[in-house]
Amino acid sequence: MSNEKTIAQLQQEVDDYIGQFKEGYFSPLAMIARMTEELGELAREVNHHYGEKTKKSSEDDSTIEEELGDLLFVIACFANEQNISLQRSHERVMEKFTTRDKDRWTRKETEEQK
């Protein structure tokens, strides 16, 4: 049995966590700054793994997975504060990709096409 959460469950878990603090969610501008910070940390980690920049011995052993998790948390905070369902956001973007952008990239051949 999988313990994976739905997007709605993820958002609820973040809301339950934030809800226990008087301060609540940061302001939208502060969250955008946090998102930018977390994205920078993710970029740095990707650069360490795939780029030319190696880690200094004094740097943390963060992973791409950890940095993605940090970014996802802040995205969920931002969505919650704005009353946005990430599930609906995802459905809308997938609709866009499967309609407007459906012929944008070269598709792989399927077994029937071979």
Image (cartoon, grey):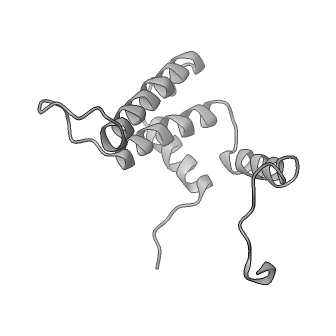
Say which residue appears at 35% left-offset and 37% top-offset: 51
Report the side of 96 relative to 50 (left or right).
Answer: right
Q: Residue at x 41, y 36 (%)?
A: 42
- Residue at the extreme front: 114
Is residue 35 left or right of 105 when viewed as pictured? left
Image spot of residue 58 (x, y percent): 12, 30
The one of 65 and 102 positioned closer to us in this rendering: 102
Residue under the point 31% across and 45% down: 63
In this view, the residue farthest toward the right is: 99
The quadrant where residue 3 appears: bottom left
Q: Residue 76: which quarter of the image?
A: top right
Give the percent coordinates (x, y) of residue 13. Answer: 50, 49
- Residue 49 lies, in percent from the top left, at 32, 44
Residue 54, given in percent of the width and then of the height, sits at 24, 35
Of the pair 25 and 29, the residue shown nearer to us: 29
Quarter of the image where one finds residue 80? top right
- How many numbered marks, from 0 up? 0
Furthest residue to the top?
Answer: 29
Q: Residue at x 73, y 44 (%)?
A: 89
Quadrant of the snapshot with the C terminus? bottom right
32 relative to 47, above or below: above
